[in-house]
């Protein structure tokens, strides 16, 4: 590889915003365009290893998934100095997991109206991913990123809350981390986080992969509503897989709670699709009339 790495040449590193066994994520400014990006730098996986398969699936997924308001945007990926580098859109509001931890400290959880906004926006992102023939397979709070619309210069343009934009408020929720994405029709499932794993995936029944994302999204919403940490495996894990939501420490309307409960139904066929959620009267009051 040439002496000066493309990463160092093209980007100014501002701060490390994430670290894990996967590698590290940096908030960077691209020198050429002056824009901020999230850049993940990970050790290049062993050729032929399952890690390499995952790294490739992540880049393939981003390449297949063009642009969508509720999927974190991909810009580039390359290999250098025995590292894999992926350059994505930087979401300036942290992850939903960060927001949940903050809520737990203050005891102020997302209220039902906000929960419906999160569920609607993430469902729009899932509808796009599923309609592209892919399943995410690792939906959870730390993989949902938050973008706060930067206040405009006071220009009086109308706030557009058209569906494709989803910015009815000033916050956008975007699905990120496509490291577990797999084809719906030709699945090579790399199980995601067991706390969010639907039982049929554990049983290696891969005929309804999109519904595993719906299951994981329901548990993500339960956490956003203030439910305690989810079990990885044990009696409570199985209680949830029998179609029960974890306890939620706030009064939700019967309709909304019932929708979340339907999303964790033991039979994946009974769970609503992402498309059905984006049209659901409970989430789209205006459609309800
Ligand atoms: C830990 N972490 C924190 C952030 C910033 C949230 O305000 C973040 C981002 C991403 C990612 C990311 C996830 C998976 C793969 C590649 C990337 Cl860049 C990780 C991120 C990403 O793709 N876009 C991000 O903003």
Image (cartoon, helix red, strand yellow):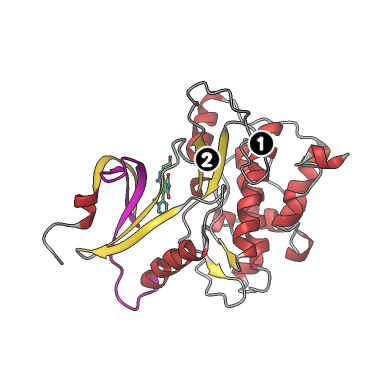
Q: Position of residue 78 (x, y in %)?
A: 30, 63
Q: Quadrant of the N terminus?
A: bottom left
The quarter of the rendered structure image containing the C terminus is: top right
Q: Is residue 58 left or right of residue 123?
A: left
Counting from the top left corner in percent of width and height, residue 159 is at 62, 30
Q: Residue 230 in magenta?
A: no
Decide: is 117 above or below 178. Answer: above
Q: Circle 2 is placed at which residue position?
A: 96
Name the residue tied to disc 1. Answer: 161
Question: Looking at the image, which residue is at 52% across and 40% down?
Answer: 96
Front residue of this view, candidates 146 and 97: 146
Q: Mark 1 to mark 2: distance in Å?
A: 21 Å
The answer to which of 81 and 19 lies nearer the viewer is 81
* Image position, residue 134 (x, y; %): 58, 66
Q: Position of residue 114 (x, y in %)?
A: 66, 33
Task: Determine if residue 189 is in view.
Answer: yes
Based on the picture, tell me whether residue 37 belongs to the magenta stretch: yes
Which region is colored magenta? 21-50
Residue 118 marker: none
Nearest to N terminus: mark 1 or mark 2: 2
How would you rate the neighbour count of disc 1 (Cα within 10 Å): few for under 14, some for 14-19, many for 20 or more? Answer: few
Mark 2 burial class by Cα count in 10 Å: few <14, some 14-19, many 20+: many
């Amino acid at each position: 590889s040439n002496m000066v790495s493309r990463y160092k040449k093209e980007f100014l590193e501002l701060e490390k915003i994430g670290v894990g066994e996967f590698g590290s994520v940096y908030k960077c400014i691209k020198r050429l365009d002056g824009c901020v990006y999230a850049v993940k730098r990970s050790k290049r996986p062993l050729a032929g290893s399952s890690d390499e398969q995952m790294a490739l699936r992540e880049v393939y997924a981003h390449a297949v998934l063009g642009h969508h308001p509720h999927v974190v945007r991909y810009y580039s990926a390359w290999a250098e100095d025995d590292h894999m580098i992926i350059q994505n859109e930087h979401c300036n509001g942290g992850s939903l997991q960060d927001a949940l931890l903050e809520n737990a400290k203050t005891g102020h959880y997302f209220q039902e109206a906000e929960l419906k906004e999160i569920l609607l926006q993430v469902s729009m992102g899932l509808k796009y991913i599923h309609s592209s023939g892919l399943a995410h397979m690792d939906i959870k709070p730390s993989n949902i990123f938050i973008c706060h619309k930067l206040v405009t210069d006071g220009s009086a343009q109308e706030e557009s809350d058209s569906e494709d934009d989803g910015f009815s408020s000033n916050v956008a929720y975007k699905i990120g981390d496509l490291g577990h994405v797999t084809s719906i029709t030709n699945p090579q499932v790399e199980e995601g986080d067991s706390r969010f794993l639907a039982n049929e995936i554990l049983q290696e029944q891969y005929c309804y992969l999109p519904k595993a994302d719906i299951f994981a999204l329901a548990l993500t919403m339960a956490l956003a509503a203030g439910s305690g940490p989810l079990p990885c495996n044990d009696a409570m894990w199985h209680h949830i897989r029998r179609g029960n939501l974890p306890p939620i420490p706030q009064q939700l309307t019967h309709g909304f709670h019932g929708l979340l409960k339907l999303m964790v139904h033991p039979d994946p066929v009974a769970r609503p699709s992402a498309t059905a959620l984006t049209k659901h009267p409970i989430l789209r009051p205006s459609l309800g009339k």
